[in-house]
Image (cartoon, rainbow, N blue to C red):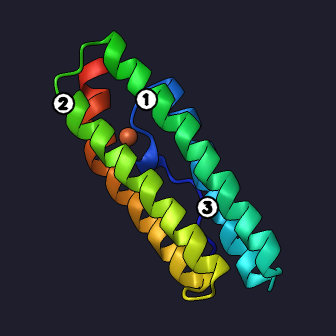
Amino acid sequence: MPLHWDEKYNLGNEKIDAEHHIFLDLIVEFDSLATLGASKDKLVRALKEIGKYAEFHFLSEENLMIDSNYPDLEHHIKLHRILVASLEDQHFKLVAEVTGPSQVFDFLFQWFALHTSTEDKKLVSFIGT
Ligand SMILES: [Fe+2]
């Protein structure tokens, strides 16, 4: 069965959950395109869309952290910066064909699953719904 949104990804904050839902949908869409044998150009554009959405979503989370005086703000923001840089790296590697779509997908999904179940979970337990 293809990857899809699961209850376990719901953290309990409406805004964060809604954005995570879209983020995962974009990752799933990238995987579907890869499975269908989409062109490199299409995959690169889909990855770029994920990168842009990630930047929007991180800014959104960071604004929530600032508004609530989240104590772990600096560390969490640093992790976001690292992902944005890694996404750019994945983008260049995909363009240069030193990586393939399935490795890019694994990277994206592992990051999503790990970051949401650890850092974002801590954030939501602090800020609440
Ligand atoms: Fe986050």
Judging depth in this view, the residue of 96 and 58 nearest the camera is 96
The residue beneath circle 3 is 27
Residue found at x 44% / y 48%: 9
* Rendered image quadrant of residue 21: top right
Q: Which amino acid does label 1 sit on?
A: Glu
Judging depth in this view, the residue of 95 and 69 nearest the camera is 95
Query: Secondary structure beneath disc 2?
Result: loop
Query: Secondary structure beneath disc 1?
Result: helix
Residue found at x 38% / y 46%: 81
Query: Secondary structure beneath disc 3?
Result: helix
111 left or right of 59 in image: left
Label 2 vs label 1: CA separation?
12 Å
The residue beneath circle 1 is 61
Q: What residue type is labelled 2?
A: Asp
> Is residue 92 positioned above or below 81 on the image?
below
Q: In which quarter of the image is the C terminus?
A: top left
List x then y, in percent, for residue 66: 33, 16
Give ligand 1's quarter of the image: top left
Label 1 vs label 3: CA separation?
19 Å
Residue 128 seen in render: no
List x then y, in percent, for residue 48: 67, 57
The residue beneath circle 2 is 72
